[in-house]
Amino acid sequence: MTYLELIKTLGLSDLIMCFMDEVGFTGKEIAESFGMTEPTVYSAKKRLATLSEGLKAVDNVTAAAKLLNEDNSIQIQVRKDLRNPDIQTVIETFSDSFGTTMSNKYDRFAAKRLIDKYTVEGIVKVIKALRTFSDDQYCPTVNNIRDVEKKWPAVIKYVGNRLKRKEIVE
């Protein structure tokens, strides 16, 4: 069984229990936090031994200690979105315009390079313009952000020609 398969079968309490064990909580403290007996905790530890070994490679297991309140109730923290908001804006605009929801790290890298060279507003306007004229036979076909970057000269030429004809209406 792989770690991924194991984690899919585990519950949230099992994972938190595993983290608490790695941080250094005693079996009695873990049992009190979850409202169970110590033998149950020890059997869970035995079942989760392989996962515990894998967690030893994780650098920051002390974050699990932050999951407990002063009254030993469990608090689930929602992670803030740490992504660059400019890159996220470009990706969301592309997804909304063309209906593709998949983006990978290479699309993010391409968006970052485009944003560094041009502005977020400019990229968003170009993406919206491409969507407006995507049915035209001469419009460059883009399937992802990398295609926008790769075909940037053709895209700018096409959008520029349409702007000269004043066909883009916002």
Image (cartoon, grey):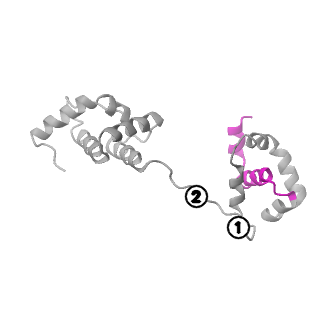
Tell me the residue at 14%/40% (across/down). 163
Residue 78 in view here: yes
Taking the magenta stretch, the answer to whether it contains residue 8 is yes
State the image coordinates of residue 25 (x, y, percent, origin top left).
81, 57
Q: Looking at the image, is 142 positioned above or below residue 124?
A: above
The amino acid sitting under disc 2 is Val
* Mark 1 or 2, nearer chain start: 1
Observer-nearest of 168 and 70: 70
Q: Quadrant of residue 1?
A: top right
The residue identified by callout 2 is 78
State the image coordinates of residue 69 (x, y, percent, origin top left).
70, 67
Farthest residue, direction front: 116
Q: Which residues are magenta?
A: 1-27
Q: Looking at the image, is 150 positioned above or below residue 58?
A: above
Q: Quadrant of residue 90?
A: top left
Tell me the residue at 71%/49% (across/down). 61
Label number found at residue 69: 1
Dot 2 falls on a residue whose secondary structure is loop
Tell me the residue at 84%/49% (across/down). 45
State the image coordinates of residue 65 (x, y, percent, origin top left).
72, 58
Taking the magenta stretch, the answer to whether it contains residue 29 is no
Left/right of residue 2 with respect to residue 78 in the rendered view: right
Q: Residues within 10 Å of mark 1 (few under 14, many from 20)?
A: few
Farthest residue, direction bottom: 71
Residue 140 in view here: no
Count of numbered marks: 2
Left/right of residue 169 with respect to residue 6 in the rendered view: left
Dot 1 falls on a residue whose secondary structure is loop
Q: Looking at the image, is 66 positioned above or below residue 44?
A: below
Q: Main secondary structure of the magenta part?
A: helix
State the image coordinates of residue 70 (x, y, percent, origin top left).
73, 70
